[in-house]
Image: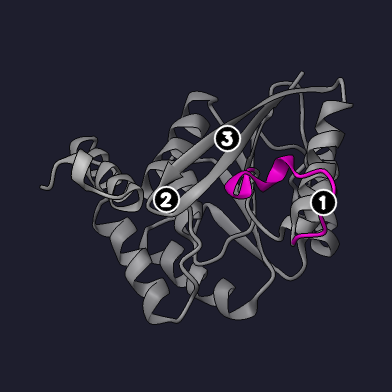
Amino acid sequence: MMEVSRMNKKDTRKAVDAYFDDKLHISDETTQAILHKNEKEGLQSIEVASAHGKMLYLMAKMSGAKTILEIGTHGGYSTVWLARALPEDGRLATFEAKQRHARVAEENIAAAGFADRVEIFEGDATKTLRVLKKRGFETFDFIFIDANKDNYPEYLEWALELSRSGTVIVADNVVRKGRIIEEDTDKKNIPHLRKFIDLLSGDDRIEATAIQTVGDKGYDGFLMAMVK
Protein backbone atom coordinates (compact mmCIF):
# COMPACT_ATOMS: atom_id res chain seq x y z
CA MET A 1 0.00 0.00 0.00
CA MET A 2 1.18 3.51 -0.78
CA GLU A 3 2.64 5.49 2.16
CA VAL A 4 0.16 7.83 3.85
CA SER A 5 2.37 10.85 3.12
CA ARG A 6 1.86 10.21 -0.62
CA MET A 7 -1.93 9.68 -0.45
CA ASN A 8 -4.62 12.33 -0.66
CA LYS A 9 -7.03 12.72 2.27
CA LYS A 10 -9.87 10.81 0.62
CA ASP A 11 -7.67 7.84 -0.22
CA THR A 12 -6.21 7.87 3.29
CA ARG A 13 -9.66 7.81 4.90
CA LYS A 14 -10.71 4.95 2.61
CA ALA A 15 -7.56 2.98 3.43
CA VAL A 16 -8.01 3.49 7.18
CA ASP A 17 -11.61 2.29 6.94
CA ALA A 18 -10.43 -0.80 5.08
CA TYR A 19 -7.67 -1.41 7.65
CA PHE A 20 -10.04 -1.42 10.61
CA ASP A 21 -12.68 -3.35 8.67
CA ASP A 22 -10.13 -6.11 8.13
CA LYS A 23 -8.40 -6.06 11.51
CA LEU A 24 -11.56 -5.75 13.62
CA HIS A 25 -13.59 -8.22 11.51
CA ILE A 26 -16.38 -5.70 10.88
CA SER A 27 -17.93 -6.70 7.56
CA ASP A 28 -19.17 -10.20 6.87
CA GLU A 29 -21.07 -12.09 4.18
CA THR A 30 -24.45 -10.92 5.46
CA THR A 31 -23.66 -7.22 5.60
CA GLN A 32 -21.85 -7.35 2.26
CA ALA A 33 -24.83 -9.11 0.70
CA ILE A 34 -27.10 -6.31 1.91
CA LEU A 35 -24.88 -3.65 0.35
CA HIS A 36 -24.71 -5.58 -2.94
CA LYS A 37 -28.47 -6.03 -3.04
CA ASN A 38 -29.10 -2.35 -2.26
CA GLU A 39 -26.78 -1.36 -5.09
CA LYS A 40 -28.41 -3.84 -7.48
CA GLU A 41 -31.84 -2.45 -6.59
CA GLY A 42 -30.66 1.07 -7.34
CA LEU A 43 -30.76 2.38 -3.78
CA GLN A 44 -28.50 5.35 -3.10
CA SER A 45 -25.39 4.46 -1.11
CA ILE A 46 -26.30 6.42 2.02
CA GLU A 47 -26.13 3.64 4.60
CA VAL A 48 -23.96 4.12 7.65
CA ALA A 49 -20.35 3.06 7.15
CA SER A 50 -19.52 -0.49 8.21
CA ALA A 51 -17.59 0.69 11.28
CA HIS A 52 -20.54 2.85 12.32
CA GLY A 53 -22.92 -0.05 11.80
CA LYS A 54 -20.88 -2.14 14.21
CA MET A 55 -20.66 0.83 16.57
CA LEU A 56 -24.48 0.95 16.68
CA TYR A 57 -24.56 -2.79 17.35
CA LEU A 58 -22.07 -2.48 20.20
CA MET A 59 -23.82 0.53 21.73
CA ALA A 60 -27.20 -1.21 21.65
CA LYS A 61 -25.69 -4.39 23.06
CA MET A 62 -23.81 -2.55 25.83
CA SER A 63 -27.01 -0.76 26.80
CA GLY A 64 -28.80 -4.10 27.10
CA ALA A 65 -31.51 -2.98 24.69
CA LYS A 66 -34.53 -5.24 24.34
CA THR A 67 -36.56 -2.76 22.31
CA ILE A 68 -35.07 -0.64 19.52
CA LEU A 69 -36.60 2.09 17.38
CA GLU A 70 -35.02 3.07 14.07
CA ILE A 71 -36.25 6.07 12.10
CA GLY A 72 -34.92 5.61 8.56
CA THR A 73 -34.66 2.00 7.38
CA HIS A 74 -33.32 2.58 3.86
CA GLY A 75 -32.30 -0.90 2.66
CA GLY A 76 -32.04 -2.44 6.12
CA TYR A 77 -28.26 -2.28 6.57
CA SER A 78 -28.25 -0.47 9.92
CA THR A 79 -31.43 -2.34 10.85
CA VAL A 80 -29.62 -5.66 10.69
CA TRP A 81 -26.69 -4.34 12.69
CA LEU A 82 -29.10 -3.18 15.40
CA ALA A 83 -31.14 -6.39 15.31
CA ARG A 84 -27.97 -8.36 16.01
CA ALA A 85 -27.79 -6.67 19.41
CA LEU A 86 -31.24 -7.87 20.47
CA PRO A 87 -31.90 -10.89 22.68
CA GLU A 88 -34.11 -13.60 21.19
CA ASP A 89 -37.23 -12.02 22.66
CA GLY A 90 -36.22 -8.49 21.59
CA ARG A 91 -38.19 -6.30 19.19
CA LEU A 92 -37.18 -3.65 16.68
CA ALA A 93 -39.52 -1.18 14.97
CA THR A 94 -38.16 0.61 11.93
CA PHE A 95 -39.72 3.32 9.77
CA GLU A 96 -39.16 3.84 6.05
CA ALA A 97 -40.92 6.47 3.92
CA LYS A 98 -40.28 4.88 0.52
CA GLN A 99 -42.19 1.77 -0.50
CA ARG A 100 -39.42 0.34 -2.70
CA HIS A 101 -36.82 0.82 0.03
CA ALA A 102 -39.10 -0.88 2.56
CA ARG A 103 -39.51 -3.86 0.21
CA VAL A 104 -35.74 -4.24 -0.26
CA ALA A 105 -35.19 -3.86 3.50
CA GLU A 106 -37.78 -6.51 4.25
CA GLU A 107 -35.97 -8.97 1.97
CA ASN A 108 -32.57 -8.13 3.46
CA ILE A 109 -33.85 -8.45 7.03
CA ALA A 110 -35.46 -11.81 6.27
CA ALA A 111 -32.30 -13.08 4.59
CA ALA A 112 -30.31 -12.07 7.68
CA GLY A 113 -32.67 -14.09 9.88
CA PHE A 114 -34.39 -11.28 11.77
CA ALA A 115 -37.88 -11.22 10.27
CA ASP A 116 -39.34 -12.41 13.57
CA ARG A 117 -37.81 -9.54 15.56
CA VAL A 118 -38.17 -6.61 13.15
CA GLU A 119 -41.35 -4.83 12.13
CA ILE A 120 -41.18 -2.35 9.24
CA PHE A 121 -43.58 0.59 9.24
CA GLU A 122 -43.99 2.15 5.83
CA GLY A 123 -44.73 5.84 5.32
CA ASP A 124 -43.77 9.26 6.65
CA ALA A 125 -42.52 8.65 10.20
CA THR A 126 -43.89 11.97 11.44
CA LYS A 127 -47.35 10.58 10.70
CA THR A 128 -46.85 6.88 11.40
CA LEU A 129 -44.89 6.95 14.67
CA ARG A 130 -48.17 7.43 16.50
CA VAL A 131 -49.18 3.82 15.72
CA LEU A 132 -46.41 2.33 17.86
CA LYS A 133 -48.33 2.20 21.11
CA LYS A 134 -51.21 0.47 19.34
CA ARG A 135 -48.69 -2.20 18.28
CA GLY A 136 -47.55 -2.76 21.85
CA PHE A 137 -44.47 -0.53 21.85
CA GLU A 138 -44.68 1.67 24.96
CA THR A 139 -41.07 2.79 25.29
CA PHE A 140 -37.74 1.95 23.69
CA ASP A 141 -34.33 1.21 25.18
CA PHE A 142 -32.38 2.43 22.13
CA ILE A 143 -33.40 4.84 19.37
CA PHE A 144 -31.49 5.51 16.13
CA ILE A 145 -32.44 8.50 13.98
CA ASP A 146 -31.16 8.53 10.38
CA ALA A 147 -33.88 9.87 8.10
CA ASN A 148 -35.05 13.16 6.57
CA LYS A 149 -32.90 15.78 8.32
CA ASP A 150 -35.62 18.44 8.01
CA ASN A 151 -37.74 16.39 10.41
CA TYR A 152 -35.07 15.83 13.09
CA PRO A 153 -36.73 18.27 15.54
CA GLU A 154 -40.00 16.35 15.29
CA TYR A 155 -38.22 13.00 15.47
CA LEU A 156 -36.61 14.16 18.72
CA GLU A 157 -39.99 15.01 20.21
CA TRP A 158 -41.26 11.54 19.35
CA ALA A 159 -38.05 9.92 20.64
CA LEU A 160 -38.47 11.61 24.01
CA GLU A 161 -42.12 10.64 24.20
CA LEU A 162 -41.18 7.01 23.52
CA SER A 163 -38.24 6.96 25.94
CA ARG A 164 -37.72 5.99 29.55
CA SER A 165 -34.98 6.87 31.99
CA GLY A 166 -31.79 5.40 30.51
CA THR A 167 -32.94 5.29 26.88
CA VAL A 168 -30.03 5.88 24.47
CA ILE A 169 -30.69 8.10 21.45
CA VAL A 170 -28.25 8.27 18.52
CA ALA A 171 -28.67 10.62 15.54
CA ASP A 172 -26.59 10.40 12.37
CA ASN A 173 -25.44 13.16 10.00
CA VAL A 174 -25.33 16.09 12.43
CA VAL A 175 -22.09 17.71 11.23
CA ARG A 176 -22.66 17.94 7.46
CA LYS A 177 -19.06 18.69 6.50
CA GLY A 178 -18.90 21.29 9.27
CA ARG A 179 -21.86 23.33 8.02
CA ILE A 180 -23.70 22.78 11.31
CA ILE A 181 -21.89 25.82 12.73
CA GLU A 182 -23.28 28.17 10.05
CA GLU A 183 -25.78 30.38 11.85
CA ASP A 184 -27.21 32.41 8.97
CA THR A 185 -27.76 29.87 6.25
CA ASP A 186 -30.65 28.44 4.31
CA LYS A 187 -28.58 25.56 2.98
CA LYS A 188 -30.43 22.26 2.84
CA ASN A 189 -30.99 20.61 6.23
CA ILE A 190 -28.79 22.92 8.30
CA PRO A 191 -31.48 25.16 9.89
CA HIS A 192 -33.47 22.07 10.88
CA LEU A 193 -30.42 20.31 12.31
CA ARG A 194 -29.52 23.44 14.28
CA LYS A 195 -33.07 23.54 15.68
CA PHE A 196 -32.65 19.88 16.65
CA ILE A 197 -29.43 20.72 18.50
CA ASP A 198 -31.05 23.76 20.16
CA LEU A 199 -33.92 21.59 21.41
CA LEU A 200 -31.44 19.20 22.99
CA SER A 201 -29.48 22.09 24.44
CA GLY A 202 -32.53 23.47 26.21
CA ASP A 203 -34.01 20.19 27.45
CA ASP A 204 -32.90 19.16 30.93
CA ARG A 205 -34.41 15.67 30.51
CA ILE A 206 -31.50 14.53 28.38
CA GLU A 207 -27.71 14.81 28.24
CA ALA A 208 -25.82 14.55 24.98
CA THR A 209 -22.55 14.80 23.12
CA ALA A 210 -21.50 14.77 19.46
CA ILE A 211 -18.56 13.22 17.65
CA GLN A 212 -17.19 14.29 14.29
CA THR A 213 -16.41 11.41 11.93
CA VAL A 214 -14.34 11.02 8.78
CA GLY A 215 -14.06 8.05 6.48
CA ASP A 216 -14.80 6.69 3.05
CA LYS A 217 -18.26 8.30 3.23
CA GLY A 218 -16.82 11.75 3.97
CA TYR A 219 -16.95 14.19 6.88
CA ASP A 220 -19.96 14.12 9.18
CA GLY A 221 -20.80 13.03 12.71
CA PHE A 222 -23.03 11.33 15.26
CA LEU A 223 -24.92 12.75 18.21
CA MET A 224 -25.32 10.45 21.21
CA ALA A 225 -27.62 11.11 24.14
CA MET A 226 -29.19 9.46 27.16
CA VAL A 227 -32.50 10.27 28.79
CA LYS A 228 -32.01 11.04 32.49
| Separation of residues labelled 1 and 3 (CA atoms) | 34 Å
Q: Position of 159 compared to 110: left or right?
A: right
Of the residues tagged 1 and 2, which is closer to the observer?
1
Q: Please state which of residues 212 and 5 is positioned toward the viewer in this rendering.
A: 5
Q: Name the spot of residue 17 as percent of width and height, x first.
A: 30, 44
Magenta stretch encompasses residue 179 = yes
Q: Position of residue 61 (x, y in %)?
A: 47, 30
Q: Secondary structure at mark 3?
A: loop
- Asked if residue 189 can be seen in this view, the reply is yes
The label on residue 191 is 1
Q: Residue at x 40, y 40 (%)?
A: 54
Which image quarter is the C terminus in?
top right
Category of crowding for the residue at label 3, using alpha-carbon neighbours closer than 10 angstroms: few (below 14), some (14–19), many (at least 20): some
Say the numbered circle drawn on residue 66: 3
Label at residue 76: none
Q: Which quadrant of the view contains residue 101?
A: bottom right
Q: Residue at x 45, y 58 (%)?
A: 77
Identify residue type, mark 2: Ala
Indicate the position of residue 169 as horizontal and vertical percent values. 67, 35
